[in-house]
Amino acid sequence: MCDRASLKHKKRIVIKVGSSSLVHEETGMMDLFKLEQLVRILCDLRNQGKEVILVSSGAIGAGRKVLGLNKRPSSLPVKQACASVGQGALIALYQRLFNEYHQISSQILMTKHTIIREKSLFNARNTFDQLLDMGVIPIVNENDTVSTDEIEFGDNDTLSAVVAALVSADLLILMSDIDGLYTDDPNKNPNARFIECVYKIDKSLYDMAKGAGSDFGTGGMVTKIDAARIATDSGCDMIISNGKDFRTIHDIIEGKNIGTLFLAHKNEDFDLKSYIEEGKRH
Ligand code: GLU
């Protein structure tokens, strides 16, 4: 079992929540209770003196509801229109909830180009640093209306790892719709074992993730391992945990044995831009 005591001392934390953790499964409407809970927990982390960044999906889902579309859109322009409507609605809701605790929040929208272009990478890093310095909680999403790659293949797991690397965060928590990484698909194989700690990301881990096959949300398990590779190579620990109860965020930081922990192993040659340009290397 790996030692989680150090998690308590993490200072700069990125938390990613997926759409499925934010909406009621039956209706696709926002789960206001959970959203309120999430915001309260993040404000409390700020009160503990931590710096917090939230990466939140949900733009397309929220926009679809506002526009009265019954099904999740499949056409790209409709998705982009939904994202454009929904992102505003999502941020308005977050800001209202954060205001309850007098916590300033902001919106940051990014694309792959933000990272690839040196100047915008520099600007984005400075903006994050400045916001964190001012005690703001930035709320990040992909700029879905201009970034077609994101909607077609992209996912916020990778985005959150990129953000963690960009700001030199020391902990990334992916609140997902699975408990963490298993040796095999737990729905099919009763002998599938839960993996509490990953020390090294290699081909065998990717093979296992493919077998485990969890493919909810936009990003599946393989995508999460890709995200872990970016985060851990940049020097940031990463945890995959189940987003069904956000109170576990607190328990994770307290060092309780929840989710799968991928331990950081800083690669001195780490270059975020080349990770993005070269794409997935498994
Ligand atoms: N950016 C998309 C949205 O806000 C979701 C991407 C994802 O869930 O990974 O709807």
Image: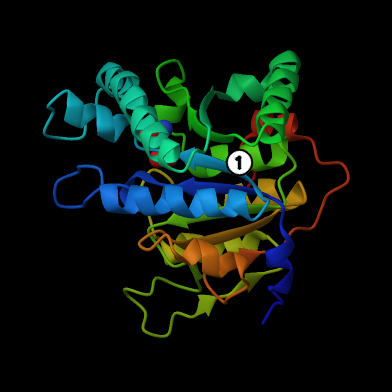
Q: Nearer the viewer, residue 168 or 38?
A: 38
Give how far across and how far down residue 156 sits, in percent. 48, 39
The residue tagged 1 is 280
Residue 18 percent coordinates (x, y)? 40, 46
Question: In the current view of this chain or complex, which residue is farthest to the bottom?
Answer: 191
Q: What element carries label 1?
A: loop
Question: On screen, 30 above or below 207?
Answer: above
Task: Please tell me in which quadrant of the rendered image residue 200 appears.
Answer: bottom right
Q: Residue at x 46, y 34 (%)?
A: 154
* Residue shown at the point (36%, 26%) measured from the top left: 87
User: Is residue 270 found left or right of 4 in the rendered image?
Assistant: right
Please state the horizontal and vertical placement of residue 67, each as a whole percent of the image.
16, 23
Q: In which quarter of the image is residue 66?
A: top left
Q: If the image is split into quadrants, where does the N terminus sit?
A: bottom right
What is the total number of numbered labels drawn onto the structure image?
1
Query: Which percent across, then down, holds residue 115?
Result: 67, 25
Colour scheme: rainbow
Q: Is residue 223 visible?
A: no
User: In the rendered view, does 218 fall on the left or right side of 250?
Assistant: left
Quick check: is the Cβ at mark 1 less than 8 Å away from ligand 1? Answer: no
Observer able to see residue 136: yes
* Residue at the outermost right position: 268
Res 202 quadrant in image: bottom right
Q: Whereabouts is ligand 1, in terms of quadrant?
A: top left
> What amino acid does circle 1 point to?
Lys
Neighbourhood count class around disc 1 (C-alpha, 10 Å): few under 14, some 14–19, many 20 upward: few
